[in-house]
Image (tube, helix red, strand yellow):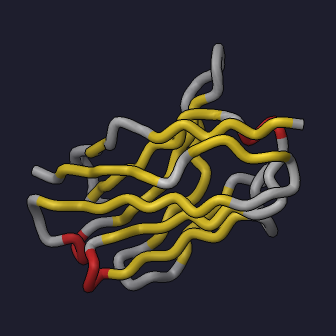
Amino acid sequence: QVQLLESGGGLVQAGGSLRLSCVASGSIFGLYLMGWYRQAPGKQRELVARIRSSGTPINYADSVKGRFTISRDNAKNTVYLQMNSLKAEDTAVYYCNANRGVVGATDYWGKGTLVTVTS
């Protein structure tokens, strides 16, 4: 079992920056692929970025490439999402995800943190 707790969301003007954090507990953090997903009102949850246990990013959504950066600190059991040049369309609830990255692995989710970008 993995428990995930996101923080860092808030209200920001377009063009601004935020850094989201997700602290994991309950298992060996370094075994998990970590990811950030988001869900805007009336839309499906979508992948934002994922990162390997080694700290190498796996992929980013096309809509955030060049603006968002995912990173992790295994010593702190924490994954981050640095979001720069925010746009109104980035407004969403952002969720942290943990997965072992093997077939049949369980997805673990945090409760989410709301990011609102005003134009």
Please tell me whether residue 73 is drawn above or below residue 28 in the rendered image: below
Against 54, residue 5 (above or below) is above
Q: How many numbered tags mark residues here?
A: 0
Which residue sits at x=58%, y=63%?
19
Question: Percent x, y for residue 18?
Answer: 65, 59
- Vertical relation: 118 (above or below) 49: above
Residue in front for this viewpoint, 102 or 69: 69
Q: Who's the residue at 45% across and 43% down the image?
A: 95
State the residue in front, 81 or 10: 10
- Please state the horizontal and vertical placement of residue 14, each as a whole percent of the image: 86, 47
Q: Is residue 107 left or right of residue 42?
A: left
The residue under the point 59% across, 44% down is: 10
59 with respect to 84 (left or right) = left
Q: Residue furthest top?
A: 42
Front residue of this view, candidates 52 and 85: 85
Task: Look at the image and tell me in which quarter the C terminus lies.
Answer: top right
The quarter of the picture where residue 83 lies is: bottom right
Residue drawn at the location 35% of the way across and 77% of the way down: 53
Q: 106 left or right of 58?
A: left
Q: Which is nearer the eye, 17 or 22?
A: 17
Residue 54 percent location from the top left of the image? 38, 84
Left or right of 65 in this view: 111: left
